[in-house]
Each structure stands twice: as structure tokens, then as C-alpha cells.
Image: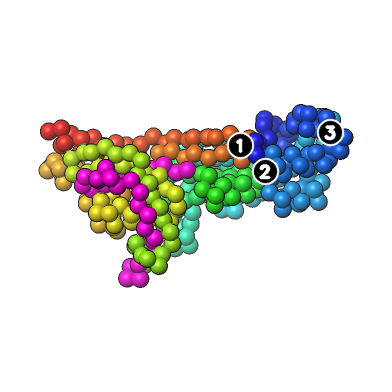
Amino acid sequence: MTGGGSWVKRGEWLEAMPGRVLTGAEDKEAAIDNWLLTTVGMPQKLHMRLRHEKGILIKGGRLRLALFPFREAGIEAAWQPLDVLFEDDFCLVVHKPAGMAVHPDGSSNEVTLDHLVAGHYAASGGGVAVRHIHRLDKDTTGPVLYAKNEFAQLVLDSNMRDKLISRHYVAIAEGKVSPGLKVIDDPIGRDRHHAARRRVSPTGQPAVTLITGREQLHGGTVLRVQLETGRTHQIRIHLSHAGHPLFGDALYGGPAWKRDSAAPGSSSLAGRQALHGELLAFRHPWTGEELAISDPWPADMLELRELLMDVWQA
């Protein structure tokens, strides 16, 4: 699969020029069907529906696809600032701040990232459903990927299942993490004694965490971490189980994230787990281009690293 190349959005239609695939074919309809299914990677069910609904049109050397029909957002809009890291007609990547859930869980009326994305879409003219592709813990910061149409959602969901979407994190863990700790391969299940917690369990789901880099600080280690699986709280559980819980992660035994733990009398830092998604890498659903969207460290984690570095140097 190489992708569909450049495109132009014209209202509800995508317009593309497949070149000789179209102009050099005797049976243009069959050639386009083959191109969509094999080169573009359009899911078969969506292709069949577009054919049935006359959503695939050929005009000269141009192909038009009804990929952008009007859709309700599906969630109430919230009018708050949103940090957009990447956006086009297919994808949106936004920064999720600490203390905000990605989507509502029905237990409160809190504003979530989905509400902010609905507001962003509405401000841009509306007609786009809110479809997040993955999630982050409420107090974890980093990039979250959204699909802006059904085609993108189907492709990105499939890529997520096939582990073609890479999530790279930075964490600040307690203690000196051994250079020999590079892979944590321990299954994760629910903790029957605590509803909010998970734990390493031989009967749990497979979970693999890769440690790809480290920086030693005083009493802590900055770790670069990549997920091969996406279990709830995975990084937090694995590092805690290895004896190195994250700073600020009270749920899994992490040390309090405060200045006065190293410099008595100074002000407190944030009280969340020191975990941030710094890079999201994925294939563009239409073009197949490899995209790597970075998200700079938030100020609180920069401050914690600086604090621990200062103490280390002292």
C-alpha cells in the first residue's frame, strides 16, 4: 500500500488524480476499484457502501469520493483553548493537558478533551464527528490522535490494532534504573482489592513496555519509553512493579512530587505522575506518509527534571 497521493477537499467530496491508473485504463471503474482497495487501502465495507451510494465518481482524469459527509460532533462543544499539533482533512493531533480526561466516563460533568475538539471543529465550520483513536490517563500529558472522517477512523483503528501507531513517552521514575532494564514483559490485570488500580498478574492481558533511553538524576531517572501494547496504566504499573514508580504517582507508590522533598521551604510542584507523551508516529491514512508529531515537555516536568539535576550536580 503506497497511498492515494495529493488531494483537494471540495465540500463533502475528495478530489484526487490517480494519473495513468485512471487515464490509461480501458475499464476505468475496475481500475479505480483496484486502486482504492490495494494502493489506497480503503476498507472493503466502506468501498462497497460508497459504490452503492454513488459516492465514487470519475470525471475525465479526476476521481471524486464522498469521504467528507456532514456529521454531528456527537458531544457538546466546549469553548476553551486547544493546542493543535497537526491537522488536515483526515487527522487531528492535539496536546492533552494534565487533569483532563480524553472522553466523558459518565461519572461527572467535567470538560474533556473530546469536548474541546468538538469546539474546535465547530469553530472551523462543523460537520465533523469527534473520533479519538487512542487515550491517555487523565493526569498524563501528550498528543492524542483524532480521525476526522470514517475512512480515516477505519484505517487508523486498524493500524492501532496492528501496532503501526507508535507512542513514545518520557517518564521520571524513582531511583536508579539499571541499564539492563530494557524490556518489561509482564501481563496486567485488575486489582480485585482496589477498583482504580491494575497490577501485574499471571492471568492478565499481555503487556510489553520498552525502555529506549535513560538519564540518571539525583534519586530519579528520566526514561524514554515506548509501548508495544496499550494496557490501562501500563507504564505506571510496569515501572512500579520493577521497583521504580513514577514521581507523583500515589496510586502506584510513587514519591510525592514536591520541591520541598529536596529543597525544604520552597514551593510545591504539580501533584501528578511524571509521565508525558513526547512523540506520536503514524502513517497518514490517505497518503501513507510516515508522520512523527512531537509534543514538547510540559513546564512541570521540565521543572522537576531541573530540580533533580540541580540536586545531583550539588
Name the residue tied to disc 1: 288
Relative image position of residue 45 (x, y in whole percent): 72, 53
Reading the image, the residue beneath label 3 is 25
Mark 2 lies on a secondary structure that is loop
Disc with the residue nearer the chain's start (1 vs 2): 2
Q: Quadrant of residue 60?
A: top right
Whether 116 is among the magenta residues is no
- The magenta span reads 166-194
Pick out the residue farthest to the front.
180
Residue 202 vs residue 58: left or right?
A: left
The residue pinned by badge 2 equals 41
Instruction: Describe the element under mark 1 as helix, strand or loop.
Output: loop
Residue contact between numbered discs 1 and 2, judged by CB atoms under 8 Å: yes
Say how the picture is coloured: rainbow
Which of 294/27 is in front?
Answer: 27
Asked whether residue 134 appears in the rendered view, the answer is yes
Q: Say which label, 3 or 2, has the lower sequence index.
A: 3
Q: Amino acid at mark 3?
A: Ala
Left or right of 94, for residue 186: left
Left or right, 222 with respect to 5, comes to: left
Q: Position of residue 12 (x, y in %)?
A: 72, 40
Taking the spot 51% from the left edge, 44% from the top edge, the residue there is: 165
Under tag 3, what secondary structure?
loop
Q: Is residue 203 above or below residue 99?
A: below
Query: Mark 1: which amino acid?
Result: Gly
Q: Quadrant of the C terminus?
A: top left
Which label is found at residue 112? none
